[in-house]
Image: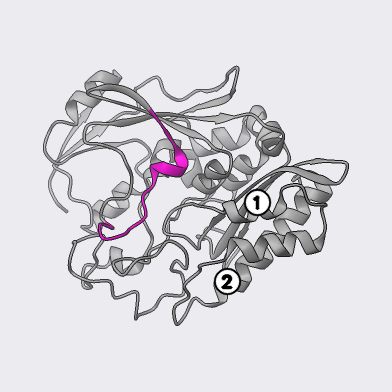
Amino acid sequence: MHPFSFSQAEHVDVAIASLNISGAKVIAGGTNLVDLIRIGVETPNQLIDINQLPLAAVEETSQGVRINALARMSAVADATLVRDRYPMVSQALLNSASPQLRNMASIGGNLMQRTRCPYFRDQAFPCNKRQPGTGCPAIEGENRMHAILGTSRQCIATHPSDLAVALVALDAVVQLRGPDGERSIPIASFHLLPGDTPERETVLQPGELIIAVEVPASDAATQSHYLKVRDRASYEFALVSAAVGLDVDQGIVQSARVALGGVGTKPWRAYQAETVLQGQSISDETFTAAAEAALQGAIPREHNAFKIELAKRTLVRALSTVAQTGGRA
């Protein structure tokens, strides 16, 4: 294992200042970072433990809910405010990882977790995300779990977070603090498409720290559902997932929120599907048309073409669940 120094920060400004150290990284739950350090993919020179920072609360605000960065996934999933007004967020968290991991993993860390692409994690293979310019063997290799939306010639790795898919659907905002102060980034813009620089995964600048995620309240957030399809019901990443919310009045969709997971190189907001749903009556035909729109532009590879039809069916089922039960099935 690569040798590193370890320190603890008890104030946000101290943590930010410590990030000036070359090769420094922050650690909270460590459920992803420690794993990557063990296999040599991450090689920090300094680990800064931020668990003493006062950033673990889930707070109601005048606009919605503020989930601080160090709140544990299990605590957020169980929070009454989240369960009642943002069911897709609670469901996405409860469909993530194992109970033990959810007790450790933080919300900020979940948004920063790195892809599960086996070529990224195995240093016997080249990987443009791990070492820019070396190639992407997944494009012609074993790509059953890889992306069909947002891919590039440099990378087709999926983003692994279930939570981020739900937050993208709900127009959440990531609050950052760095050497130049605080700034707010819509989460739809927080994660980057791979393009020609797949090693750059977020807009986070050097020295910046995720402080919180703010999720606005809406009728579509309250009437929402997260559906995850995976190879096994226990600890497993998504083949495809759908986060949907509907505001329906007298059978007509007033507004819709749709995002997909397991199919995109970043959490994938399906704006085309929302446009199809807007102003239409709730029906199987409407939901099927929305699913067709959501997968427009998908680029399948040899082993993952099945994801197109699977994603359509998953989205139709998620929309039907919200229409029939308000998302609480």
Q: Residue at x 35, y 22 (%)?
A: 53
Mark 2 or 1 closer to N-term? 1
Residue interval drawn in magenta: 184-198
Q: Position of residue 57 (x, y in %)?
A: 50, 23
Quadrant of res 265? bottom left
| In this view, 85 is above or below 241 | above
Residue placed under numbered mark 1 in the picture: 275
Quadrant of res 253? top right
Return the mark for residue 111: none
Q: Position of residue 173 (x, y in %)?
A: 47, 32
Please name whichever residue, 27 or 310, is drawn nearer the observer in this view of the structure: 310
Return the mark for residue 308: 2
Determine the residue located farthest toward the right in the rendered image: 250
Q: Residue at x 21, y 72 (%)?
A: 124
Amino acid, disc 2 = Ile
191 part of magenta stretch: yes
| In this view, 237 is above or below 216 | below
Distance from disc 2 to disc 1, alpha carbons, whole Å, reads 19 Å
Mark 2 in CB contact with mark 1 (< 8 angstroms): no
- Residue 240 appears in view: yes
Q: Residue at x 17, y 45 (%)?
A: 44
